[in-house]
C-alpha cells in the first residue's frame, strides 16, 4: 500500500461514520459473521468512541482500516468503508440480544438440516457462542 498524503488521509478518514458497529465482539460462525449487541469495546460510550484520535494505541482490538485492505465480513454494510465494496461485507448486526439469539437459532436449523459436523458431532452454535461470550466477559 502506498503512503497517503495528508489530504488523502483526511478523505479516507472521513469515510468512517464513527457509528461504533465495528466495536462489537464478533463471532465467525463459518457461514456468516455476527456482532454481539452486548459485548462492546470499553471505549465505546453512547455509541461513540471516547478515544477515537488515539484508538489504535489505547485499544488493542482496534484495527486500522487501510485503503484496499478491507477485512471480509468484519464491517456492517452501513459502514462508509464497506460501501466502497458492498458485496464484500456480510456482517450481521442484530439490534438487540433477542434478535442476536434468533439469528443463531435460525443458523442452527440450517446446520441441522445440512448435518454439518465437527469431530463427528453436529455443530451447536448456541453452545459455541455461549463459550465465546463467557471467554470475553459476556
Image (tube, grey):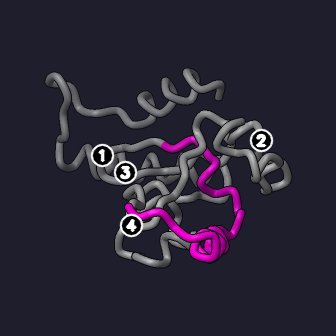
Task: Please give the range of residues in magenta.
Answer: 1-26
What residue is pinned by disc 4? 68
Q: Where does residue 133 sit, x and y in percent of width and height?
A: 56, 29
Q: Is residue 57 above or below residue 130?
A: below
Q: Residue at x 67, y 53 (%)?
A: 96
Mark 1 and mark 2: span between their CA atoms?
28 Å
Q: Residue at x 59, y 58 (%)?
A: 94
Q: Where does residue 105 sit, x and y in percent of width and height?
A: 44, 47
Q: Which mark is residue 43?
A: 2
Q: Give yes or no for contact between labels 2 and 3 (Cβ–Cβ under 8 Å).
A: no
What residue is pinned by disc 3? 107
Q: Secondary structure at mark 3?
A: helix
| Residue farthest along the left direction in this orientation | 120
Q: Secondary structure at mark 2?
A: loop
Identify the mark nearer the N-term, 4 or 2: 2
Q: Give yes or no for contact between labels 3 and 1 (Cβ–Cβ under 8 Å).
A: no
Q: Secondary structure at mark 4?
A: loop
Q: Give yes or no for contact between labels 1 and 4 (Cβ–Cβ under 8 Å).
A: no
Q: Residues within 10 Å of mark 2 (few under 14, many from 20)?
A: some
Q: Residue at x 63, y 68 (%)?
A: 13
Identify the mark nearer the N-term, 1 or 4: 1
Q: Residues within 10 Å of mark 3 (few under 14, many from 20)?
A: some
Q: Where does residue 122 sit, x and y in percent of width and height?
A: 23, 32
Q: Give yes or no for contact between labels 1 and 2 (Cβ–Cβ under 8 Å).
A: no
Q: Which mark is residue 30?
A: 1
The mark closer to the camera, 2 or 3, is 2
Q: Residue at x 64, y 43 (%)?
A: 56
Mark 2 and mark 3: span between their CA atoms?
31 Å
How many labels, in total?
A: 4
Q: Is residue 87 above or below residue 121?
A: below
Q: Where does residue 20 sit, x and y in percent of width and height?
A: 69, 56
Q: Secondary structure at mark 1?
A: loop
Amino acid at each position: 500500500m502506498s503512503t497517503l498524503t495528508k489530504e488523502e488521509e483526511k478523505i479516507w478518514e472521513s469515510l468512517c461514520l464513527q457509528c461504533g458497529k465495528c466495536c462489537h465482539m464478533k463471532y465467525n460462525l463459518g457461514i456468516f459473521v455476527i456482532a454481539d449487541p452486548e459485548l462492546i469495546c470499553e471505549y465505546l460510550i453512547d455509541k461513540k468512541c471516547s478515544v477515537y484520535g488515539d484508538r489504535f494505541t489505547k485499544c488493542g482490538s482496534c484495527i486500522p482500516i487501510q485503503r484496499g485492505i478491507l477485512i471480509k465480513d468484519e464491517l456492517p454494510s452501513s459502514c462508509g468503508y464497506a460501501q466502497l465494496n458492498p458485496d464484500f461485507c456480510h456482517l450481521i448486526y442484530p439490534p438487540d440480544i433477542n434478535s442476536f439469539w434468533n439469528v443463531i437459532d435460525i443458523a442452527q436449523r440450517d446446520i441441522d438440516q445440512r448435518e454439518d459436523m465437527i469431530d463427528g458431532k453436529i455443530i451447536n452454535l448456541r453452545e459455541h457462542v455461549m463459550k465465546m461470550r463467557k471467554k470475553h466477559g459476556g
